[in-house]
Amino acid sequence: MTVMEPNASVNDVELADTGTEATESILPPAPMAEPQADPGAPTEGPAAEELRQANGQATAEAPAEITPIPIPREMPFPLPRRMASGRYRSRPLGFQLELRVDIDGRRPLRRLSGDYYAISGTTVTYFGSWTVDAVTIQSSSSQVVITGTARTTWQTTFTVVKVTIARAYLTQPAPPAVLQWYTPSGAAGARYDCQWESTSFRTVELEQDCESAVTPFVSYNTGSLPSGGSARTLSVAGAYAEAGVQMLDTGGGNIIGAPANYRWTNASLHHAMQAHFSRWQERPQFRVWLLHARAHEYGTGLLGIMFDQQGLQRQGCASFYQSISSGSAQDRRTQLYVNTHELGHCFNLYHSFHKSYMNPPLPNRPGALSWMNYPQNYNPGTGAPSGEAAFWAAFGFEFDTLELAHLRHGFRNAVIMGGNPFGTGAALEVGEEYLDRVSDTSGLRLAISPADQRPLLGMPVVLKITLTAERTQLVHRHDQLHPKFGFVHLAVSRPRGDVIVYQPPVQHCVDPALVSSGHDAVQPVSAYIGYDAGVGQLFDDPGTYRIRASYAVPDGTMLVSNTATLRVVPPRTSSDDQVAELLLRDQAGMALTLLGSDSPYLADGTNALETVVSEHGDHPAAVFARLALGTNAARPFAEVDATGQVRVRERELDRADELLGAAVDASRGDGGLDDLTVYETLGYLAGSHEAEGDSERARTLRHDAATLAESKHAPTSVLRSLQE
Amino acid sequence: MSGTGAEPGTLAVELGEGFADDDVSVLVDGTPVWHGDRVTTNYSVGIADVVRLPLPASGRPTVEVRVGGRSSAQRVDVAGTTGELRLRARIDPAGALTLAPASEERRF
């Protein structure tokens, strides 16, 4: 990675390539070498060359022997200009920018937006998104200049953007867009030269499969019945094309032979998606699956569902034809509506009358003439006609303006299938900081999982971090994957809506200990991450938290983990409530981080741990309190008094044995501490006994740890470290 | 999901909007007849689940839905009922639970 913030720095390579300012040229530069991604893009023909000559720009290859024919400098008739709107892309140098310009064409929203991808070693990683909600447009015969202030998903002082696009005639190739960032005070930041890519703001691959008893929808003429829009033949892809989203039908077309009168369940639909969606992966991607089916168990009234609400969501939906397959114009209209509507859910759009249930909520819009409303729920208010007939009479077969803004310019993870959970960040207001791997040839996998996916409020949150090396290479030793060493970083999205980049309260500066790893060798470590140096208690609200890790590989590659989700559940009993109150104290979080302390500055936290053990000894959180207090008892504690004298409290091994023994015994099964912490605890206690000369007790403890690890099929790296 | 299809003489309790990882119980005349944990609304249809129960032949049973510490009840008259009798429970954004008669409408 050449720079850490894509708006701040000038991309020298791009500047060197650019030459003169595009804004000074009436006509665009010579055609780009890169192939045009949009098959519908106009290609340059003889007329473009004529126009270039007409404006005094001779081509390098013009044959000298031909006598020039005088051509008037102004065309005798007006030629239509190209639209500036569409999708542009910079070259993949450091950061690659996907830019969306939305100022002309069908339903222009006067917005800009973009997504950054970081190129780092062998990985391409989604970095962040930005959007300008309202732009200023200055247009002349030679160029259009678009300016505005951006909202971004990351912190930057370069928030003012200026995009310059040369104006071109329809017969000419699309000019590039030159994007320049500034601070509000006018200091210049990064510049990106983006080549035109498509008239569509986004491109999504659509795979459709069909139950054997169903004839799937193809198209509907919107003039067949009265409506509020112009008559045209619309397919589902056509409906999205009108919204600025290109739906590429990737075929698929599996015929799924379900039993007669089969009623789908959400579980069977999800299974079918995994079995039949050939491009399905458990990662965000602009790919979606639509099943044309007959019936759902919820009843004949259910015409469609976006069923994919487990794991990474919104990758599949289904429509049900049982009650809309008569072949009438009404049924074909409903089929178009339902199919377009369900795919809208996959883009993270809620119903017009359910917006108040989103996260964050928006006001409901029951009067929306939108694909996302229910015709029978239509109510424009103010006494205007409402209900189904009124809806169809006024409906123009389109999304409403806010939905259009989301589809075109929503932050990537709020839109992309497999991104944010359904309903989260669909209001164009929620930033997301999650890095997302787009391609990765590093030969490494970084996986994280919480030790407890549904901890009670106040329970210490422990994360298991696992690095797997598929091919032999140097990586950090497993213990150095703990975030406190600074090679692994975590981002935590909290239910209150903020995103915290985890800062361990105690950071260890160490020389990297590199080991050769390969052949799918696994390097695991577990880390308590409940307390942050900046915000204190990290998991102090009930609700859903999303965590992602990144690892700086020794060769410079930035590796990104899966997204782990944990749900902190509220207290259910008075004991839960009291334990939560004790363990969510600020000093308790620090005492747990340090695994106990005699420091008077942490007396409140230590007392909280003692209270949990003495008064709530059977509570699930008590093992963590015993772990911290017992580990502290197993080591000496040195205190410098006010006179400068150092007083040492010696090891209290009887107390350590009692506390840690109880914590370990409570964790030999499925509950309690995670396995890695148990092995480490036994090892630590063994070391303490060894230091006090009790080698026999140390051997017993190490043998216990090794036996336990073997019985639980611990990875080789863990077994080896126990032997060492 | 406790049943399939609309059958004669059934009571359908539709758990609608507002459910989020909730423990939900359905009781008839005070007797628990259904329990679900982690009940969550699918907002693509506005339904978390549809609980289908056999209707008693006669009488006016009281159907109650409990969600955590909240409860809402509805007395239903089964006299002369054929087919499906439907109730809909929902939790509004402010957290209030309601249970009311409903008809099966087109959802998608």
Image (cartoon, coloured by chain):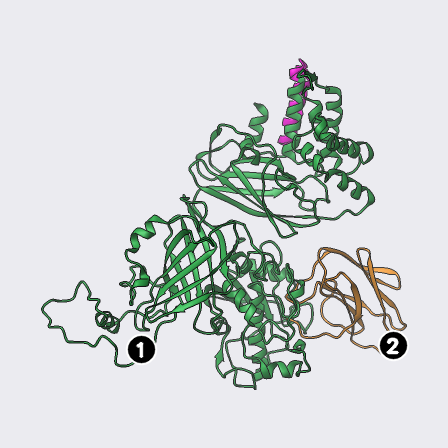
Which residue occupies the extreme right position in the image?
B59
Q: Nearer the viewer, residue B65 or A263?
A: B65
Q: Nearer the viewer, residue A73 or A557?
A: A73
Q: With A25 as the anchor, is A722 left or right in this view?
A: right
> What is the quadrant of residue A580 in the picture?
top right
Residue A333: x and y in percent read 57, 80
Q: Nearer the viewer, residue A619 or B37?
A: A619
Under mark 2, the amino acid is: Ala
Residue A250: x and y in percent read 45, 65
Graded by Cα atoms within 10 Å as few (under 14), some (14 to 19) or many (20 or more), the crowding at tag 1 reads few
What residue did someone put label 2 on?
B79
Q: At 83% across and 70% down in the image, what residue appears?
A: B55
What residue did someone put label 1 on?
A79
Under mark 1, the amino acid is: Leu
Q: With A157 as the anchor, is A356 left or right in this view?
A: right
Residue B27: x and y in percent read 84, 62
Graded by Cα atoms within 10 Å as few (under 14), some (14 to 19) or many (20 or more), the crowding at tag 2 reads few
Residue A584 against residue A684 in the figure, above or below: below
Question: Residue A578, labelled with which disc?
Answer: none
The chain drawn green is chain what? Answer: A
Q: At 33% across and 52% down in the image, what residue appears?
A: A14
Q: With A260 as the anchor, is A457 left or right in this view?
A: right
The chain drawn orange is chain what? Answer: B
